[in-house]
Image: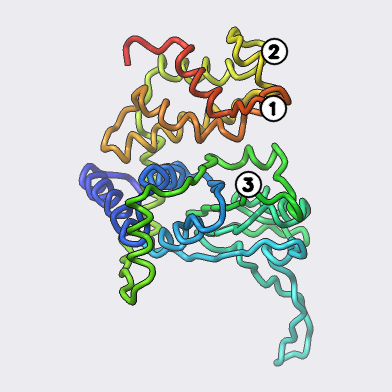
Amino acid sequence: MELTEDNVKTLLAKLPQLKVEMQKVIVGQDAILDELLVAFLAGGHCLLEGVPGLAKTLIVKTMSQALHLSFRRIQFTPDLMPTDIIGTEILEEDHATGKRFFKFNKGPLFANIILADEINRTPPKTQSALLEAMQEFEVTYGGQTYPLDKPFFILATQNPIEQAGTYPLPEAQLDRFLLLIKIGYPTEQEEFEVLNRTTGSKKADVKAVISAEDIQQAQTLVRQVSISDDLVRYVSHIIRATRPDNTSVDYIKEWVRWGAGPRAGQALILTAKARALLKGRYAVLTEDVHAMAPAVLRHRILMNFKAEAEGITSDKVTAELIKTIERPKTI
């Protein structure tokens, strides 16, 4: 559908309303909500990481309530099989003719928003079943390809503390997630507000403010946001500097085992465009790139053993890169 000026203004007015509706339930976590909305507008998937009790699941459920979209929650467990999420063929009988035939019974993956709860608790066989869905937006079963509903958004959660009985996601699958969002503990005032809200009888009424058509239009609009060649080149310099073999940054050579690939650059530009749109701008600024760089690179930079022993994280590496790489003078 062609976006007219009036359509664009109406659409941009709805985006802030989405966050307002979510904040009726979610206390604080402004940066987390912004990153989630950025990933959704950019058409990518998110991995939320945090200890239990920080409202990871609640954030996703609330987001689905504020959207006119279908929602499914999949609780990942060690005994979950690929067919449990994709679907399976069942034998049915035509009562008129008596003939039997196989019919594909769609699994919970066929929805707009998928909450993959505790994704690291299921074996690699089931984890890999998400790969085609996340990248191609379709699944294949019995030689037949089934397109998924659009928009399609997977939001997976994982607990970084427990290691027993878990299966860490391989780097190839981590790279499929547009952003890795870390959720920390609330502030003292936020925690007071959480306790006050959740222990009473009053419940927030979250209204759906954006339709599937609106979201698809917004995702189209994101790619039309302009970015200068200098800023694209700046993003390229940041991504290439993460690779120990060809970087000029000593910090990277000392702490990093493996750098980010080209998909990281694509993710950084797309999320910077989505952030600019959320801020009401039609052009990307350097601040958009800096704001999205940690969540984009967090799971794409692999630290070496020395860095892990010293407590050096990929976030520290990203912060160092932003300081070191020369910024475009015209932006």
Q: Residue at x 61, y 48 (%)?
A: 134
Q: Is residue 150 visible?
A: no
Front-most of 46 and 164? 164
Quick one: SS at disc 1? helix
Quick one: SS at disc 2? loop
> Marks 2/1: CA distance?
22 Å
Q: Amino acid at mark 3?
A: Pro
Q: Amino acid at mark 1?
A: Ala
Residue 42 vertical position relative to residue 252 in the rendered view, above or below: below
Q: Residue at x 52, y 54 (%)?
A: 152
Upstream in sequence: badge 2 or badge 1? 2
The label shown at residue 160 is 3
Q: Residue at x 39, y 38 (%)?
A: 274
The label shown at residue 196 is none
Q: Amino acid at mark 2?
A: Asp
Viewer-side label of 2, 1: 1
The label shown at residue 245 is 2
Residue density around tag 3, few if under 14, some if 14–19, many if 20 or more, within 10 Å: some
Residue density around tag 1, few if under 14, some if 14–19, many if 20 or more, within 10 Å: few
Residue density around tag 2, few if under 14, some if 14–19, many if 20 or more, within 10 Å: some
Q: Quadrant of the C terminus?
A: top left
- The part of the image, by quadrant, that contains residue 85 is bottom right
Q: Is residue 290 left or right of residue 196?
A: right
- The part of the image, by quadrant, that contains residue 180 is top right
Give the percent coordinates (x, y) of residue 20. 28, 55
Give the percent coordinates (x, y) of residue 10. 23, 50
Q: Which residue is mark 1?
A: 309
Viewer-side label of 3, 1: 1
> Marks 3/1: CA distance?
17 Å
Give the percent coordinates (x, y) of residue 15. 30, 49
> Marks 2/3: CA distance?
29 Å
Residue 250 vertical position relative to residue 113 in the rendered view, above or below: above
